[in-house]
Image (tube, helix red, strand yellow):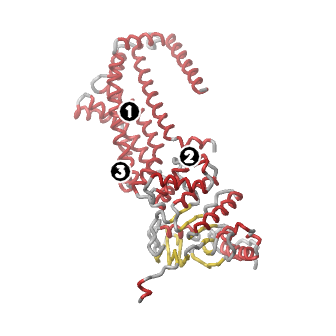
Amino acid sequence: MRIAFYRLIFLAALIALWWLASTVVERNLVPSPWATMLAAGVLISEGRLSTALVDSISIYLGGYAAAILVGIPIGLVMGTVRPLGKTLEIFVYALSATPRVAFIPLIIVFLGLGPQAKILIIFLGAVMPILINTYAGALNSDQELIEMARSVGARRQRIFTSIVLPGAVPFILVGLRVGATIGLINTVVAELYTAVKGLGGLLAIYGNTFRMAEYFVIVLTLALIGVIVTEALRYLENRLGRWRRSDAVL
Amino acid sequence: MMALDAPTQPDRIVLTGVSKTFGAGDKAAGTVALKDVNLSVPDGAFVSLLGPSGCGKTTILRIVDGLILPDQGRVLVSGATPKPGPDMGFMFQSFRLIPWSTVRGNVEFALAESIADKAERRARAERYIHLVGLARFIDNYPSELSGGMRQRVALARALATEPDILLMDEPFASIDAQTRELMQIELMRLWSARQSVALFVTHSVDEAILLADQVVLMGPRPGRILEVIDVGLDRPRWSYDVRAEKRFIELRAYLWDRIRTLVLIDPESDFFGRNLGAAD
């Protein structure tokens, strides 16, 4: 509760700073908070913000969901089948170190400028942190607990579902959070580089025409999406980590 | 001829010439955990494995449970090659509770292989949780329990399958002295009610004598059995002051002396070559 209060104070300070910047910086490069709010009102009433939002969120969720569906299983398999994991990990790390933007021209050649290309760009950004963290989580499984499970006669499948998988959950959630952020960044990147649509598209249009109030509305909308997604994941983390809560006490 | 038709197996656990080396595929480079170990544990016996660190006590338990295979020698448990499962209960030194499961979940985890019926499993888990005195904490997570309580969960889990053989690896090593004494009595009570075979690994001379019918003294590097001693104190031992018995005091002095010597002549030990006031 106290933290929420501090956060509000900090938010007020940010807005004050913003307002100050808008009066100091010349040539209308920084719109005032009030002008931004008015622009937001117009964008919402014209329906342009919601159209862009639906565009962006649908490709974002598409790419992110694909990243989850691919990243978690591959990470788990790599972590459980050791020779496979050891063989593949160097390639995974190499791929994750390559800037995914480098693939965009290639993607455009193959998939064009439509939503498929965008979803693939988002997928490529989000899948790596999810895969790598899941892999780390599976590798990190508690060998002593696994031996305990063996001693009560548990078979491989049960050891996996009741020891390895739950043990990897905290790692997977970290991967999901990092993946969600990178996926959002790549959503904008995709919309800038391929067919100019969605929030990224609006960003390009307003940026090029110096309509800074509208531009700020889009930036703030993106920040808001980021907050909502990470908070949702944090909620999930708390739900799944109930058993951990009392650790702080001991 | 008739005897051959019905092979009798008076001993529950039989190890014959068991050796085990860890580390490095190359045998010469690895650590010899056990060398030519022979041990027979009769039905219903409580046996303590006593010895300094590095004498392969834990390795014996893991071999008997079937968690690892010996490099050489034969292991027979109830007349067959051991396989981990509900007929043997293993109590680990570090408790090994599943942190994201409640007390109930942890005990039920051990029962999944032997009891298919969910309600029956639940009832069995509850009975044993009650037996170790944790009924009030049945829905708590391990992180919410004290060390002694966690150990009792581990005990309930090991006992809940009602195993023929109970394997315990220094189960009381990491709990405080008072809880430890109470847990020893608790264990003796629970064990005497069922008289399964118990193999109990410990560093503590007192604990070894107090609990066991037989004390197996082991030596380090390579891990081997030096001597098997019958304790011969009356049961139930919680009904009188065992530690004041002449037999207990003699055994304690003798075992202490042997262990001290073992440690002093072991080049790998921290106390190698020290003068710790040996009797002679």
| Residue drawn at (58%, 54%) of the image | B129
Q: Position of residue B104 (x, y in %)?
A: 53, 50
| Residue drawn at (27%, 24%) of the image | A195
Rendered-image quadrant of the N terminus of chain B: bottom left
Disc 2 from disc 3: Cα separation: 42 Å
Sequence-wise, which precedes: disc 3 or disc 1? 3
* Mark drawn on residue A102: none
Residue hosting label 1? A183
- Three-letter code, disc 1: Gly
Q: Circle 1 sits in a helix, a strand or a loop, which is it?
A: helix
Q: Are marks 3 and 1 in contact (CB under 8 Å)?
A: no
Would you identify the image quadrant in which residue A185 lies?
top left
| Left or right of residue B65, residue A60 in this image | left
| Closest to the observer, B246 or B8 | B8
Residue hosting label 2? B139
Q: Position of residue B93 (x, y in %)?
A: 58, 60
